[in-house]
Amino acid sequence: MFQIALYTSLILSTAGLLFQVYRFKKKGSLWVPKLKLNLDLKPALFNTIFQSRLFRASKTRWAVHFLVFSGFIYLVFFHALDELTVFNLFQYYQPTLDPFQFLRNFAGFLVLVGCIGFLFRRSFNTRINQDNKIKYKGIFSIILILLVITSGFMLETIKIISEPAFLEMVEDYSDLDEETGLDNLKIYWKTHYQVSFKKDLLITEDTLERGRLLNNDYCLDCHSKIKSAFVSNAFAMHLGKPANFLNHYRADNWLYPIHYLLSFLMLVCLPFSRFFHMLLIPFASARHKVTDKYFQKKAVFIHPATLAACTNCGICSEVCSVYPNFLITRNKQILPHSKIESARKIIFTAHLKPEELNQLQLGNDDCTMCNNCTDICPSGIDLQGLWKTLPQTLQKMGYPDNYTFVKDKALQEWGNKESEKEQATGAHELTENLTGRVYSFENCVQCTICTNVCPVVAYGGNDNDMTPQQIMNLLRLGKKQTAAGTRMVWNCLTCYLCQEHCPSEIKVADIIIELRNISNQAADRLKIMNAADKANKL
């Protein structure tokens, strides 16, 4: 039965892994001409075994994860796979001998402490903008691990107190009976091994000594003192009256398949749960990070498997340099961990509403490419590559950045549309210190000095449309919205040469910066309304 269950779980797990590989390959990437993986195994090795990046990001989280990881890996290789590992390494190996008995309990204890720490930390909303969907991710995997470890401890506890299991060992490995001192051995095992016997036994110093000698002759080679199994022994000591009930119904016989079936279930769930991160994180950590050289050659791409390695820890959002923007706009798509979640939906399900796509574009547009999130990501995900490729993907989906959105509209169309939206919504620019006051630009004499010193005019080519003095003239004509939509406003390098050389001392560069802010706010409003219109049509 167990062999059939094992082979079935292995087949299902392998099929799941192949399906995930096929899905990653089919989904391709957000933007990639050719898939070419450049892997570095050294960081993958360190980040997998020692979780070095998580240690650097958060010592508390590292402690919780490392307890679970290290204890669980030991149990897999030196307990579950003992016939393939320790039996071949140690000729004297027995699961009931030390140090193996102690190490098994110690590893299980580490996993229990780590799982409890994980659940305790998750019970508090300590992460930035943590919604319930993210908060409860990974809970199933942790609960399943807890069930496996707990059932393992309970199985060992039941076997410790089991009189039927004791009598089976006596029958298999000795010729003792009531006449040859079996009761003495029972007394010794009741006292030192916590076995619960139904029959009352008279315990004296003499019977204990005889039992000790029999134990040395028949049992000591395979059974160390049970105190080393400190977790199971503690449970056995406090079972009390239920022990006889459990022995009567052979609880060890029905707890044994439960423990193994839970382990097989964990194997089946490997490709579809947080357990899969044991494979995804090494892959993400091994990926070479994006550089400007790769990006200029259009060799940058985001592999779906690296995004799937995200554990939703939220550490990236804690170090985000534009987090203050989120406090003002409350657009959660500014936060890196929210953008990752949205990008995964785009890749794997494409279930994002128009307003969500628009918010994602606005949030990603706020990114300063400071690299803080990539540097600290415990999973080793190249987040900088994601932020650089998202604009192209969103533009193809009809959600361009503000520069592209403004540039693709004729100046007259831009001015008219923005004026209509402003009148309809009552929206006004937040910043009009200069463009809202005529005296800021009315003294412009159109001398073109600002244009002559402007590097954008000199080297901008076809990417530019107007000159600084033409923008000043638009403002004098009351065409502020049209001025805000010019490419010059967006292409300005803010070198301040125009402002420094202006004979009328007009703050040309400051006015252009203010116009860019006005244009940015106007584009945001228009795109939000366009997204709402699309949502209403769906």
Image (spheres, grey):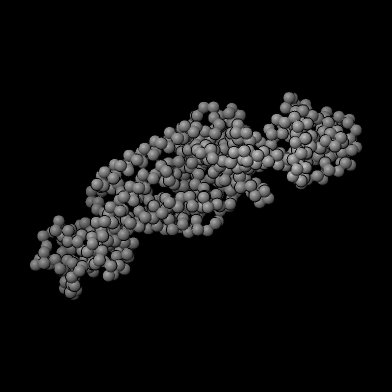
- Which residue is located at x 82 percent, y 45 percent? 433
Give the residue furthest to the left.
Answer: 179
Residue drawn at x 86%, y 33% is 473
Of residues 173 and 280, which is closer to you in this image? 280
Residue 474 place in picture, x, y as percent: 84, 34
Judging depth in this view, the residue of 232 and 484 nearest the camera is 484
Task: Measuring from the top left, give residue 343's x and y in whole percent.
Answer: 55, 40
* Quarter assignment of residue 187: bottom left
User: Given the current orientation, which residue lies at the most extreme top position?
Assistant: 462
Q: Is residue 453 above or below residue 312?
A: above
| Residue drawn at x 33%, y 47% as measured from the top left | 264
- Callout count: 0
Provide residue 373's location: percent of width, then percent of height: 58, 44
Q: Is residue 262 above or below residue 204?
A: above
Q: Nearer the viewer, residue 402 or 233?
A: 402
Residue found at the very far front of the displayed protein: 537
Q: Is residue 426 left or right of residue 15?
A: right
Residue 493 in view (yes/no): no
The answer to whether residue 16 is visible is yes
Image quadrant holding the C terminus, namely: top right
In screen coordinates, is 426 left or right of 185? right
Give me the residue at 72% from left, 27% from top: 463
Nearest the viewer among 369 and 224 is: 369
Residue 16 coordinates in the image, percent (x, y): 39, 39
